[in-house]
Image: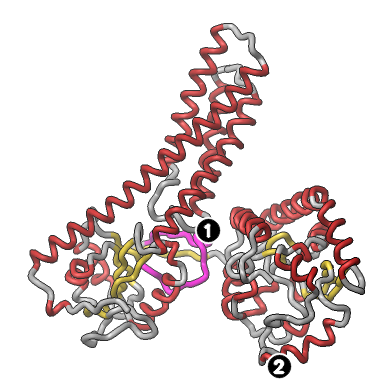
Amino acid sequence: MRAEVDLVAEPAATTYAVRAASATARARHWTVRYARILLLTDLAAVIAAVGIAVLIWAIRAPHHHPGPVLLYVGVSIATMLGWVVALSVSGTRDVRIIGFGPAEYRKILNSSLAFFGLVAVVAYVLDWDLARGYVLVALPAGVVLLLLGRWLCRKWLTAQRLHGRFSYRVLLVGSEAASMHVAQNLERHPAAGYQIVGACVPQRSLGGLLKGTDIPVVGTVDDVSDALAALRADTVVVTSGDELPPNRVRELGWDLDPARHQLVIAPSLSGVAGPRLRTHPVAGLPLIHVDFPTMSGFSRLVKRLFDIVGSSLLIIIGSPVLLAVAIGVKLSSPGPIFYRQERIGRYGKPFGMIKFRSMVRDADKQLAILLAQQGTAEVPLFKVTDDPRITPFGRFIRAHSLDELPQLFNVFLGQMSLVGPRPQVAAEVALYDDVAHRRLIMKPGMSGLWQVSGRSSLSWEEALRFDLYYVENWSLTQDILILVRTAKAVIAPGGAAH
């Protein structure tokens, strides 16, 4: 439990100032230090990518006149410097997005494409004889190396944040109910780097904790400045405006030191990602426009093309594995190689899903009895703990998700997607409430956000929350990241992979 903080017992303002200064120094230290680490990794990735392109150019055409050689050397140096500058200008090292979520990766990809588009235009205007192979090598190699470097840095940063380091120290300000909601969501993702150290609510009870948490309530909404110093916090998160009228929120911002603190407004929205939010100032009001989640037009075309290309490549590359698993299933236990079952797809349309059989032949007949025995017959997630129906070979292919491979044909035929909500049987869908039905506005997927966030160890409520977040905030970048995490889980499955 966190140590309780009593502002009444705190020393005078001088002590507050000293504590705040030391906290600021630490906060500035980690943000500056991490930004420098990212700059160095970006620079190394860009130098390596451009170096690879120049090396390939030199090998393919070793006999050059001094002019073309000097041109390529100059272009290469300018490309490296310009690329690093482009990454900085586009905010890829902004401390508000680094270390968590897809925004960091998306900015790297977009800024790299925009920069090389500019290089191509300049080369055309100045009539530079810039080999296409140079661009075709430097761009993809650089993007891959940049993303790899950021991923490695993120793994290190996440490890630090899980131990309470390299994080913002957050003071919640607002009603108790809203603060509790924000606290529960932030504490669910410690890797995001928001460490909640206290709360200021309208009516403070001395020695009390924020309901449902172990976060100390250290004052009222009038004690924010003192609480920041006492808790050595550097971030104020306003959780509701019920007790904070507009002029009070504005004054709160004035009281903060922009060099040491940041002010964050948490609107009463959850499960909505950045791409759906647009801030539009109108008459002095920062209005937040929330786009409705849709999968139509260009977005649907992009996802479908991604599924066709991805499933085709995986079927071709994985054909030896498909054959080996099929032989293993046939030899390990009596019964068919494939297991076919009707599942519910987009908008409630049923389809026949295919898997490698991993259970005994009459497994479906035993399901109802097993669910009743463990008391989950009324929960729309038919998972049996320590399922006795699974064969030994079936347990192995399930651990590595090899039983799912035939679903690539479902994806190719358009019945499923590579990434999406997990397809469920009609009996499970019959237990849906109105909220759960929103899972069906998108094609079901072979993998999904909840599978890579805990797989079968998650409860139905947690799995539903992840599925709804995915459906409401789809992006191609997120699909790619989920597939990367899926590949990692297939290669090295954890205890929840069964």
- The structure residue drawn at horizontal position 63% and vertical position 54%, both measured from the top left corner, is 484
Q: Secondary structure at mark 2?
A: helix
Q: Is residue 186 left or right of residue 427?
A: left
Q: Quadrant of the C terminus?
A: bottom right
Q: Is residue 308 left or right of residue 140?
A: right
Image position of 100 with respect to 8: above or below: above
Front residue (pair 182, 317): 317
Residue 185 percent location from the top left of the image:
45, 73
Quarter occupied by residue 394: bottom right
Q: Which mark is residue 373?
A: 2
Q: Earlier in the sequence, mark 1 or mark 2?
A: 1
Image position of 113 with respect to 287: above or below: above
Residue 117 percent location from the top left of the image:
57, 33
Front residue (pair 306, 52): 52
Quarter occupied by residue 395: bottom right
Q: Which mark is residue 275?
A: 1
Residue 157 percent location from the top left of the image:
42, 55
- The structure residue drawn at horizontal position 59% and vertical position 26%, both measured from the top left corner, is 53
Front residue (pair 181, 57): 57
Kind of residue sitting beneath label 1: Pro
Give the magenta range: 265-282
Quarter occupied by residue 365: bottom right
Q: Is residue 279 magenta?
A: yes
Q: Is residue 383 visible?
A: no
Kind of residue sitting beneath label 2: Gln
Q: Is residue 12 left or right of residue 220?
A: left
Q: Quadrant of the N terminus?
A: bottom left
- The structure residue drawn at horizontal position 57% and vertical position 74%, both measured from the top left corner, is 465
Front residue (pair 424, 275): 424
Q: Secondary structure at mark 1?
A: helix
State how far apart marks 1 and 2 are (Cα). Answer: 44 Å
